[in-house]
């Protein structure tokens, strides 16, 4: 049976395409595992003495309510650091023994957001920084967590506190109160856990604990 002229042209085109290198090739055999997806963002856990903070690149906040509220406040910053603490102690420019003792009791908390141009490994000592890759889903959960942790004013904007002694940072009221078992280090460990990293926040009180668990998570991610 004769093949219509139009169909003969289609068959010739299909044959020619399959003759090209790699065209119409059979799929390669694999071990069934999908290639790892590149991280949506790279976070850093930063130790600042007894206190830990979470560093995010500014571009990771893009398109989120958190980014819309904070990025205009730090126009020259490429990184934002988030830290949590007892408001009375954390916002005091020179806390005394009474403020330190107050940290043993629950109370209102504050979140400090600081802007930095250099990346954390350049701004802080190498031993005080842990680099952690985060997937897109984890980044979205983390940004939602940080946004929820900021108390809002009547307009729905983060509630800024009047303390201005930190040249790099702005203090905001926290929506969650401070407690000895929910201090700055427990807060950062919880944030990393919410971001999908294998960091167990239970029992974290000291900066060394948070850093140790973050380093273990970084090794798992690298392996």
Image: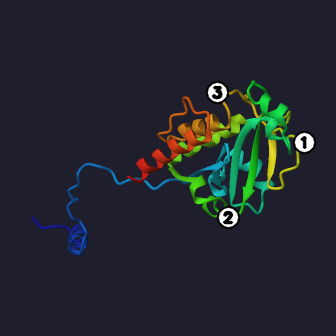
Nearer to me, 198 or 22: 198
**Marks 3 and 1: in contact by CB < 8 Å?**
no
Callout 1: SS? loop
Q: Tell me if label 2 and label 3 are in contact, CB under 8 Å.
A: no
Specify few, some or many for label 1: CA neighbours under 10 Å numbering under 14, 14-19, or 20 or more.
few
The residue under label 1 is: 162
In the displayed structure, does residue 24 sit left or right of residue 184? left
Q: CA distance from mark 2 to mark 1?
A: 27 Å
* Residue 13 in the image, given as x and y percentages of width and height: 25, 72
Q: Which mark is residue 204?
A: none
| 74 shown above or below 17 | above
Instruction: Name the residue beneath numbered marker 2.
Output: 118
Tell which circle, 2 or 3, labels the residue nearer the N-terminal end: 2
Residue at position x 83%, y 38% in the image: 159
| Residue 157 appears in view | no
Q: Circle 3 is placed at which residue position?
A: 181
- Left/right placement of residue 194 relative to residue 179 reads left
Residue 73 lies in what quarter of the image? bottom right
Q: CA distance from mark 1 to mark 3?
A: 27 Å
């Amino acid at each position: 049976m004769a093949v219509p002229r139009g169909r003969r042209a289609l068959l010739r085109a299909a044959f020619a395409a399959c003759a090209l290198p790699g065209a119409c090739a059979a799929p390669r055999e694999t071990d069934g595992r999908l290639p790892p997806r590149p991280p949506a963002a790279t976070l850093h856990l930063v130790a600042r003495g007894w206190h830990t903070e979470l560093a995010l690149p500014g571009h990771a906040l893009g398109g989120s309510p958190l980014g819309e509220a904070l990025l205009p406040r730090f126009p020259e910053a490429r990184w934002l650091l988030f830290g949590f603490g007892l408001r009375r102690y954390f916002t005091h420019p020179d806390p005394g023994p009474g403020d330190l003792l107050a940290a043993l009791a629950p109370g209102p908390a504050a979140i400090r957001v600081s802007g930095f141009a250099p990346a954390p490994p350049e701004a802080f000592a190498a031993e005080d920084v842990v680099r952690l890759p985060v997937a897109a889903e984890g980044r979205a959960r983390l940004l939602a967590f940080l946004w929820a942790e900021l108390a809002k004013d009547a307009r729905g904007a983060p509630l800024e506190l009047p303390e201005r002694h930190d040249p790099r940072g702005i203090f905001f009221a926290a929506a969650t109160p401070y407690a000895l078992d929910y201090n700055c280090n427990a807060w950062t460990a919880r944030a990393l856990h919410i971001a999908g990293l294998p960091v167990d926040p239970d029992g974290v009180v000291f900066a060394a604990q948070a850093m140790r668990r973050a380093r273990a998570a970084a090794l798992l991610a690298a392996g």
